[in-house]
Image (tube, coloured by chain):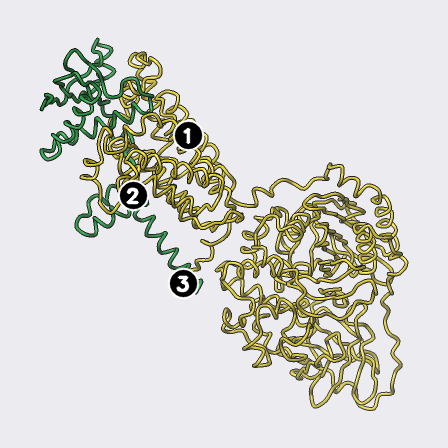
Chain colours: A green, B yellow
Amino acid sequence: MRSIKRALLVGAFGCHLVLVVAGAAHLTARVHGPVGRELRFYDALSGAGDSYSFFAPAVGPQLHVRFTGDHIDETLEAGKSREVGFRLGNVAGTVYVASKRDDLRRAFLASLAARFFGAHPDASVVRVSIEAWEVPTMSEYRAGARPRWRALHDATFVRNVP
Amino acid sequence: MTWSMQPLFRPVSARPIIALRVGLPLLLLFHLVWLSSDILSLHGSRGIVPWELTDLLRDPRVPGLSTLARPWMLVGIGEEPAIVLLLSVYAGSLLALALGVHARISAFVAWGLHLGLLTSAFASYYGVDQLANTFLFYLFVASFRRRDETIAVGGLRVVQAHLCVVYLAAGLDKARGHQWWNGEAIWQTVSQPVFATFDLASFAAHSWIPMLLGWATLVVEIGYALFVWPRHTRKVWCLATIGLHLGTGVLMGLVFFSSVMILLTSCLFLIPETVAERARTRPRLAFAPVAMMMCLPWSPELESLVHRLMARDHVPGVAVGIVDRGHLVYGRGFGERDVEAGLPVTLETLFPLGSASKAFTATALALLADEGEIALDAPVRAYLPDFSLADPTASATVTTRDILTHRSGLPRHDLFWYEAPLSRDELYHRLRFLEPSGPPHDRWRYNSAMYVVGGRIVEHVSGQTWESFVQSRILGPVGMRRTVLSTEAMVRDDDHATAYALHDGDLHRIPTFDANAIAPAGAVQTSVNDLVRWLTFHATRSPPLLGEDMWRELHRSQADMPAADEPEVRNRHYALGWIRETYRGHALVMHDGAIDGFTVHVGFLPETGRGLVILMNRDLATAALMALAYSAYDRLLGLEPLDWEGRLQEIPTRTMNVAKTTLDFPIETVAGTYEHPAYGEITIRTKGDDELAMELRTLRFTLAYRGARRFLSREPIADGGPHIAVRFANEKLIAALNFDAGDPVQVFTLTAPRATRRSRASSPRTAGTSGAR
């Protein structure tokens, strides 16, 4: 009985490790249909199918959310701790990705606008911008180029006063 | 060859996982506190990305914070209080996990809530949150209780392998991009406002710096999976990895991420996983005041006794060690390990343990039993289908416990294996030809050969040789670094004892006995310093190789033994490879060993955790050994010392003066070569006009006639042993080669009349004995 239990344990851990390797090799994401759904469910629970492309293959630009309007110019992460700021930068990235989808764009950007209006009751209009910090290459920098924020996407919202 | 799962379940120290169990929750707790002022911005329906949106993008089967908060909201608790409540439970479970309180339940709750947070706040999460989820999952799955000190190595390897995959994948993914080769990745990173701790614009003018940093990152991450495993590169690679993350923490401000990564590498690869590494320190004379007070008052008496016994019984060398709960509180070598070369005995001098080796095979089998690979009470045939004894009932029913407690029904049969030119395999297959003395399971009858069966079970179940198993599973973890498992290996060592025997009052150097064929019963060769570790394990279960129950089973009285000659010794029982007795009212677990040229004692007092090692390089120096051992135990127990020196004296072995009986048959008619299927050949020659010379391998006996074709050997089988009775009838030689009167005789059949073969031995020898005193 104990041998059967051990055989099952070895089998389970073996399968788990296979999924770990498959996830890290970006193979799990290629599996679709019911099997893919189950794999992703197990991945979400155990982390077995995660990929680990931290800062890879290239380091992307830092993103942030900028609010402008009614003489206000601020960013989402301003004044937060560095850890929170980093996380809010990730939120900006998520909103940017969502902004490319017709079904999600408005909802995500509107939620940010709503947050702005909540913080500024007197404001009647806001432009929500997703901006990227563009860093020139080292050779461009030596030639005089300097980093700057560049708008990737923006949308203007007007408070709907009933 | 069958594949065994057993190596995957080998116990290793749980300290790496325990450290992870403490460290990871504490870091997550610290992180939670750090984010607390903004936590509601990241979570909740009024967060920056509200639940309504995150729920659109997540797998509905994976519980999010909204799923977990909903039941509370249904009973009237508001959304924010519900979130605060869940976060409080999360914090509590992390704290409980770190403290090891209901670790598995705490890990489950912490993992579940972390997953909920991760799912609901996926927009803001990054790699470290993913990794925390993964390793919380492992902490939940890792099946260990708070008091457990070991886990299965396979479990630890899975967690370690996952970390290697993380680094390898991260490194390979980076290597696919140009930025990590030309330094742009480092430049881009340190130039971003969120990561810019220092002004590193100067990197642009010195692009080789970020380029080297990029290469170093690739080397460390890709090499991690390869170099973190070998012992000689592990520490360097771990330190390089920690350096990488320290750099990330300092230069990029990713303190939480860096802390988690440093924790993972430190716990999983830097904390010793084997109990051996814990026991690697050499035993030292304890400087603890209590220990010194315990040993100092009487050690001069003991040393004086050793010198007197050595002189009295012509013992060339003695090594003595006294251990007290893991500390060598007294250790000293006396005399010479090699008289001719004038080399001294040291605490590192290797001596053969003889039968004191049996405890190693018993421990090996106990390890397998503890892991569920064998059952001590299952028939041997369950593991060795070809196991066969002369008695069919015994063949089918003898258990592993029977062979370890000498209850197979076979008597000693020492001359069956002593100097027999047989391999261990041949010896095993000849067991079926040995005559039993009684039924199996009945009573204790000492038989070393059955430990060969024990060793064979170890080999068949583990898939390793007996030597490999004992080395990797016992000697390594216990830290017995000098111990070897063959005579050949011992004599190759510069510091090994030479064998001596006493013949007619003179000390002679004799060949070292090759115990390879019977290794599981008597081939451990070790030193005082290593035996200190061995006794520490048996006296205190440190290191915890075995569960407590199985460890106690090794030393529990299991088979009644005949009463000792000394009235102070009572309740003698055989345990598993050990003898348990009561000495002057105190439990004593011990085993002696006696093999050609060596006499040893290894024992401990379970009540106090103190133990004693005595190693002598003289054949059958039993009187000196016991006098010294009991004198030491008197002092270790704080009892009035008895006069063991006076009571235990050697009786010189002399050739017996057997009265001659007039021959009444032509003696030359029985000369010839006789054969026994197990014992092999005995050669009989005439010696003078009225005696016979009997040769069994290197053993030679003179047989004096006793009438009716019966003879009696002038020499005993061994010192203190009986003389051999031999009878000739119908071309058979019937000999009583065992030690007890009730034991069966061996019937040898004439194969070559008028012996023409000669023994290969050049000098007459009597048999040594390997046994329990």
Q: Is residue B262 left or right of residue B40?
A: right
Q: Residue at x 36, y 42 (%)?
A: B111
Which residue in the structure is indicated by mark 2? B75
Q: CA distance from mark 2 to mark 1?
A: 31 Å
* Near-viewer residue (B275 or B520): B275
Can residue B246 be seen from the camera position used here? Answer: yes
Please give the chain letter of the residue carrying mark 2.
B
Q: Chain of mark 1?
A: B
Front in this rendered view, residue A23 or A123: A123
Mark 3 — residue?
Answer: A4
Q: Quadrant of the N terminus of chain B?
A: bottom left
Are callouts 3 and 2 both on one chain?
A: no
Mark 3, secondary structure of its residue: helix
Near mark 1 (Cα within 10 A), the count class, few <14, some 14-19 or many ≥20, is some
Between label 3 and label 1, give the one nearer the viewer: 1
Give the x, y percent position of residue B105: 42, 47
Q: Mark 1 — residue?
A: B30
Residue furthest top in the image: A144
Which quadrant would residue B546 be assigned to in this image? bottom right
Chain of the residue displaying label 3:
A
Query: B533 or B3: which is nearer to us?
Result: B533
Label 3 packing within 10 angstroms: few (<14), some (14-19), many (20+): few
Discs 3, 1 touching: Cβ within 8 Å = no
User: Disc 2 on helix, strand or loop?
Assistant: loop
